[in-house]
Amino acid sequence: MHDKELFLCPPLYLELKYEINPWMDTSQPFDKQKAHEQWWTLVELYQKLAPRKVHILPPRKGLTELCFVGDSVFAVQNKALYGNFRHPEREPERHYVVEMMTTWGFSGRFVPQAIRYEGSGETMLWRDSILFGFGQRSHEEARVFLEQTFHRKVHGFEMELERFYHLDTALFPLDDDLIVYFPNAFGPIDTETLNSLDCELLPITEEEARGFACNSIVFEDHVITHTESKSFIRTLQKRGYSVIPTDISEFLKLGGGLKCLTLQHYL
Ligand code: ARG
């Protein structure tokens, strides 16, 4: 697996004030304080595992969902590819992320404005290649910019279900030999692509997928996953993985999990 460092941004201005995915329901109560506590618990966990690999970006007023900081960018070895959000509500976040990543010394490329691309929400580095989701939030045309920026083979996956709108809600490369995925989120062509990858595939149930099981992170040899995916946690433990369950339930109301809160920079 690739070594990585993490960037996170506190949910200081997070609000449930619009609905841009089926998880969001503005009539539901949203506990900002609880979200804040859950976010800090996650950050403290990362810091305990590898303090020098965890960076906190300052929040900015008005950028409501900036805590899902990876959705603006995909970053490998100090190169960044910046995208364009499908929903205008989130577009301003991208300018902030460009500013921040530039300050951190990343060299950046931009996907042209007419092409939607939601960064790390849709993209993962796996072995020597890139896994890329499109169809709901990103245009397939973003693929060529990934190839040109990172010079790696790109495997594309069309996201079939509205509820599983980003690749990181339905697929999770756990290590070089195992990919976890929610089968219903993909059509026959993508299932074929997955089967051609020459690795083990671990399908999960709808209940596990709804518990954001695929929105997990591997960090310093541990799998950090949402507490709600109980049976998934047991499956991983039986396979000998060190699993650290973490509660991010408040963020599920926005359609985000712990991976969405964590921008991974692959080193
Ligand atoms: N409410 C946000 C949206 O719909 C949540 C983003 C979660 N990010 C992710 N990588 N799945 O854009």
Image (cartoon, rainbow, N blue to C red):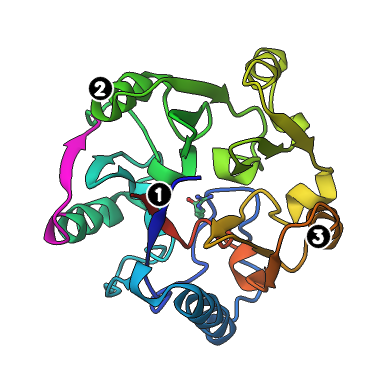
**Relative to 88, 233 lies left or right:** right
Mark whose residue sits in front, 2 or 3: 3
Q: Residue tagged by mark 2? A: 148
Neighbor class of circle 1 (other Cα within 10 Å; few <14, some 14-19, many 20+) is many
Q: Looking at mark 2, is its residue's CB closer than 8 Å to ligand 1?
A: no
Q: Residue tagged by mark 3? A: 237
Q: Quadrant of residue 237?
A: bottom right
On the image, the x and y values in percent for residue 259 come to: 53, 57
Decide whether residue 108 is among the magenta residues: yes
**Relative to 228, 197 lies left or right:** left
| 228 vs 23: above or below | below
**Whole-Å distance between the Cαs marked 2 and 3?**
39 Å
Secondary structure found at label 1: helix
Name the residue: 80% across, 51% down: 208
Decide whether residue 231 is among the magenta residues: no
Q: Taking the image as drawn, is residue 60 in sight?
A: yes
| 55 vs 218: above or below | below
**Relative to 192, 11 lies left or right:** left
At label 1, which amino acid type do we have?
Asp
Mark whose residue sits in front, 1 or 2: 2
Magenta-drawn segment: 102-111
On the image, the x and y values in percent for residue 264 come to: 41, 54
Foreground of the two, 60 or 265: 265
On the image, the x and y values in percent for residue 141 come to: 36, 19
Q: Residue tagged by mark 1? A: 71
Name the residue: 50% across, 30% down: 131
Q: Quadrant of residue 227?
A: bottom right
Name the residue: 41% across, 20% down: 153
At label 2, which amino acid type do we have?
Gln
Neighbor class of circle 3 (other Cα within 10 Å; few <14, some 14-19, many 20+) is some
